[in-house]
Image: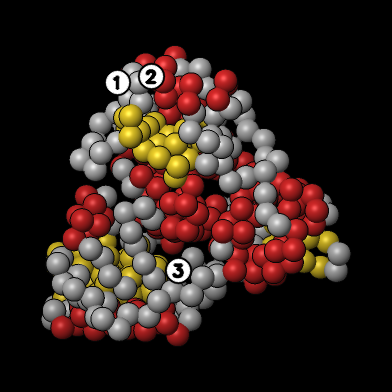
Amino acid sequence: MNNYETGLLEAAAAHLRARGLTVTIKEPRRDEHSDAWLRVAKGKQHIDYAVDVQRQVTPQTLGAIVSQLNHRAALTKKPMLLVTNYITPPVADRLANLEQQFVDTAGNAFLDAPGVFVFITGRRPAKNAVAQRPDRAFTPAGLKTLFAFICNPQLVTATYREIAAAANIALGALPTVMTGIQQAGHLHVMGNKRQLVATRRLLDEWSLAYARTLRPKQLLRTLVSPAFEAWREWDLQADGARWGGEPAAALLTGNLKPGVLTLYADKLPARLMVQHRMMTARPNDDHNLVEVRRPFWGEVSSVRADVVPLPLVYADLLATGDARCLEVAEIIYEEYLARLFTST
């Protein structure tokens, strides 16, 4: 952890102590898959947590964060405690429904362990919160480059011109991006040789940063369609569109009924819009929604012509924050992606 994240943890722990709990913080070893160990005790009862510090949690990033925490819990064999700057009441409710324990620096918390139960929401954050400084590995250009590497790990050995084409970024931006990816620990460089550190942590961190930074910028428009239920019969080819998110997962696994249809296309699919009587969604529309998003990648392949690359399907599912989508994201990972990544 850096000094800022350490400060978040200390401030969150202080709020727990103010509630009459005894809190002990211990630094982990580098191989222990957590930012810290934290013991919370009340009387003779105590619970040991592995801690994950996140600077911000939003509805868009919640799914990726919970997936990452579940993976770390499996590695540490301990319950994960999410520590962050501020949790809004709606996000707090969703985390509690997902049984994800948390505490923030405003004093909001959800702890549920033998002898200890705390659920506090609605406390406001301090006005002097420090803004997060973006990591160069997770800027839009960095995210595009990492996505190309995740889809094709051998691409890291290619020329910079080939990497830039696959990532759909300017060639001149690539040296800074590659340095950032290396500094983040996702790329090993020895002389002229480069190797991607292809871990589950990389995929989850990319998914989280994608939901926070790049995904909102790719939304062209949200529409509604009365032909929503017949989406499997839609012909996407003429508009050069592909399914992402929930419909892509439904096609790949058969385990999900989409609540939102996500389409990736370079422009609004005029033929589809006319054929299926799509109209711009109003603020209060919450059924039969069709999201049209702009592709951000370059020369990257997929397993099906009508579906976006699999790591993006996984990330889109996490970005919903919906429990059923998180379950299907895990299925996508195990069936299609696990062989590409190490578990650490």
Calculate the distance from the C-alpha at mark 1 to the C-alpha at mark 3: 47 Å
Q: Secondary structure at mark 3?
A: loop
Residue 34: x and y in percent read: 45, 68
Q: Secondary structure at mark 1?
A: loop
Q: Residue furthest right?
A: 192
Residue 116: x and y in percent read: 16, 67
Residue drawn where x is 46% and y is 17% of the image: 234
Left or right: 134 in relation to 302: left
Residue 121 position by quadrant: bottom left
Residue drawn where x is 26% and y is 65% of the image: 87
Dots 1, 2 in contact, CB < 8 A:
yes
Task: Quickly name the residue at label 2.
Answer: 276
Residue 40 position by quadrant: bottom left
First in residue order: circle 1 vs circle 2: 1
First in residue order: circle 1 vs circle 3: 3
> Mark 3 belongs to which amino acid?
Ser
Residue drawn where x is 24% and y is 43% of the image: 283
Q: Secondary structure at mark 2?
A: loop
Residue 220: x and y in percent read: 45, 42
